[in-house]
Amino acid sequence: MNEQDNIGIPRWKRVLDVSAVLMALPLLLPLSVLIAVVIRTTSTGPFLFQQERVGFRRRRFMCLKFRTMYCGAATVSHEGHLKNLMDSDAPMVKMDATGDSRIIPLGKLLRSSGLDELPQLINVLKGEMSLVGPRPCLPYEAEKYLPWQQERFNAAPGLTGLWQVSGKNRTTFTRMMQLDIEYAQNKSLWLDLKIIFKTIPALLVQMSDMLLNKKSRPNLVAPKTAMPVRAINN
C-alpha cells in the first residue's frame, strides 16, 4: 500500500466503487423508486432515515437507509441486544429474526435481502463508504471496542464485506471482528471482486433463514418506549 492509500481510501477502490454504482444505476434507480413508493403506501412517514455511524479512521457520517420500521418505533433495546452479543459471543442473530411488530409490511424482506441499504450508494459516491468493507457501526458500539478491535477502522465501511459472505448472522461477534480486520489488512481489487460476486448467494441464504424463522416462530411484541429516528422527508 502506497502513501496515497495511507491518506484515504485506495484509488483503485474509489474507481471500482464509482464505476460499479454508475453502471448499476439504470437498474437500481427504478427499483429504489418502487421501494420508496411501497414504503409510503404501506406506512406513514418518510421513506428514508439517516443514522450516525462510525466509518474509516473513526470518522462519523450520516448513513442512509430505507425506513423499514414504523415511525416512533422503539430502538433503545438494540443497545442491550448488541451488548449481550459482545459479552456472550453468541451467534449474531438480529433482534427481528423471530418476528418484530415494529417492522412495516415487506420491511423484513427489505432487510433480509439488503435492499433497505440501497440508499447507502449515495454514501459510497460521497466517499464515506465503499461497496466492500466492514459494516458501519454505531457510535455506542465503537466505544465498547477493545484495543485490538480498533483495527477494523483501517478499512472504509461497506455495503458488503468478508464477514457478510462468511456466515454473517451465523458467526459470533469475535469472528466478525477477526474477518473485518483480516479484510482491512489484505484488501485488494481481487478480494473486493471476489466478495461482490459472493454477495448474492450469501443474501439468498440470509433470506432462506428468514423464511424458516418465520414459519417456525411467533412474532415478538415490540417494547412501547420509543426513541426518535432522524428521518429525511421526500
Image (cartoon, helix red, strand yellow):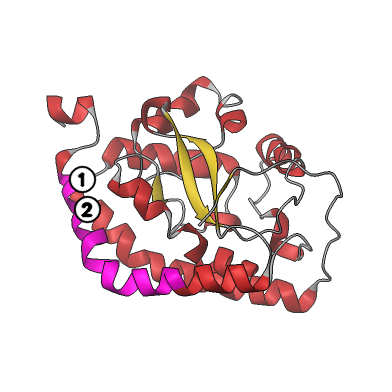
Per the rendering, the mark at residue 33 is: none
Q: Which residues are magenta?
A: 12-33
Where residue 39 sits: x, y (%)? 59, 68
Farthest residue, direction front: 234
**Which amino acid, mark 2?**
Val
Secondary structure found at label 2: helix
**Is the residue 84 above or below the residue 94 in the image?**
above
Decide if residue 79 is in sight here.
yes
Q: Which residue is mark 2?
A: 18
Q: Looking at this view, is 32 or 20 the one in front?
A: 32
Q: Looking at this view, is 42 or 111 the one in front?
A: 42
Quadrant assignment, res 107 = bottom right
Q: Residues within 10 Å of mark 1 (few under 14, many from 20)?
A: some
Farthest residue, direction bottom: 215
26 left or right, relative to 103: left
Where residue 18 sits: x, y (%)? 22, 53
Q: Measuring 15% from the left and 40% from the top, which residue is drawn there?
A: 11
226 left or right, relative to 97: right
Quadrant assignment, res 20 = bottom left
Dot 2 and dot 1 residues touching (CB under 8 Å): yes
Decide if residue 160 is in sight here.
no
**Is the residue 91 above or below the residue 43 in the image?**
above
Q: Main secondary structure of the magenta part?
A: helix
**Residue 22 belongs to magenta span:** yes
Q: Measuring 68% from the left and 40% from the top, which residue is drawn there?
A: 82
Where residue 187 sits: x, y (%)? 26, 43
Q: Measuring 55% from the left and 41% from the top, which residue is drawn there?
A: 51
Q: Looking at this view, is 208 or 232 the one in front?
A: 232
Per the rendering, the mark at residue 14 is: 1
Secondary structure found at label 1: helix
Q: Measuring 18% from the left and 31% from the top, which residue is drawn there?
A: 5
**Residue 102 belongs to magenta span:** no
